[in-house]
Image (spheres, rainbow, N blue to C red):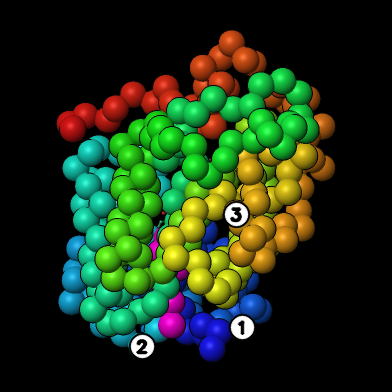
Amino acid sequence: PAPRTILLTGAAGGLGTLMRGLLPAHGYELRLLDLLPVEGEPDAVVADLGDRKALREAVRGVDAIIHLAGISLESTFDKILKANIEGTYNLYEAAREEGVGRVVLASSNHAVGFTPRPAGDAPHAPDTLIPVDTPRRPDTFYGLSKSFGEDLAQLYWDKHGLETVSVRIGSCFPEPTTVRMLSVWMSPGDGARLFHAALTAEDVGHTVVYGSSANTRLWWDLSSARALGYTPQDDSEQYAGKLIAEQGELDPENPDHACLGGHFVSHPPIWPY
Ligand code: NAI
Ligand code: 15L
């Protein structure tokens, strides 16, 4: 049977708030969890990913989990370790113990952020798009934690038969706000469509997909996402004229423009480690 009751972690965050609004129309009942109270949702579970008992209770009885909670930008290694690495491990352990069959994991383009973007003018030829099996090249401790999450997902599939779709999200915001985002933007509507496909496709094992809209300036290969049944409906190109007039085209000589991860590649480590 199709999954119906979903635990949405990170429900108070930006993406969580967008998905809380959009996923019910795809037929889901959401159980919400976040470190912070979720506005207007008194039944949301307020818990830290470090609280294994709370996680165990929160996952009990759900059909699947969409795991968005965690630190979503670069931070100190210690904070990333706690929230993203240990926190994701705690969630998978809770899912395994409670017999939850599938996780949709918010990975990130920053797991492969040091990968050079396709050169030249868009649209890029299909054989130049970055494939999902490109070697991981995290651009930050943050990206490293997403790389860990993908490996953890693979381990829980191989060892325990717990399925995951790891979604290397580009930028999911209401509108693209930078020229880079013309290539990596995922509209909220397409985000909900992709999560729906990741929840309902059969026999995913551990599947890695990029998460973006069908952008004219796309840098990566969406075929593994499409194979789940995802059909993106949006394209950032309608924003291109305005953003390029304001910010200029990407400069191949600028290191912040050269790789998938954008300015994360030159982000200095945050001390203390
Ligand atoms: P956000 O920072 O707005 O939301 C993250 C939420 O996680 C927050 O509400 C926060 O309170 C919660 N959280 C943090 N630490 C926690 C802990 N220890 N226990 C419980 N909850 C905790 O981030 P956003 O943009 O909503 O992203 C959601 C997820 O998607 C993150 O995992 C992020 O890395 C990933 N992602 C998002 C992208 C985007 O474009 N929004 C792009 C790529 C990945
Ligand atoms: C991410 O992983 C971040 O969570 C999000 O805030 C954006 O910075 C996004 O990547 C991006 O690459 O634009």
Tell me where the magenta segment starts and ends, as one range.
63-68
| Amino acid type indicated by mark 2 | Gly
Pick the front one: 1 or 237 = 1
Q: Tag 1, which secondary structure?
A: loop
Q: Position of residue 24 (x, y in %)?
A: 60, 79
Query: Residue 86's spot in the image, x, y percent?
Result: 21, 56
For residue 170, above or below residue 202: above
- Which amino acid type corresponds to the residue marked 1 in the rendered image? Gly
Q: What's the magenta bit mostly, secondary-structure-wise?
A: strand
Instruction: Please name the residue that numbered disc 1 is placed on.
Output: 27
Q: What kind of element bears circle 2?
A: loop
Which label sits on residue 224? 3
Q: Where in the figure is residue 20, as x and y percent of width and height?
A: 54, 71
| Residue beneath the point at 51% across and 71% down | 203
Q: Residue at x 64, y 16 (%)?
A: 251
The circle drawn on residue 61 is 2
Quadrant where the N terminus is found in the figure: bottom right
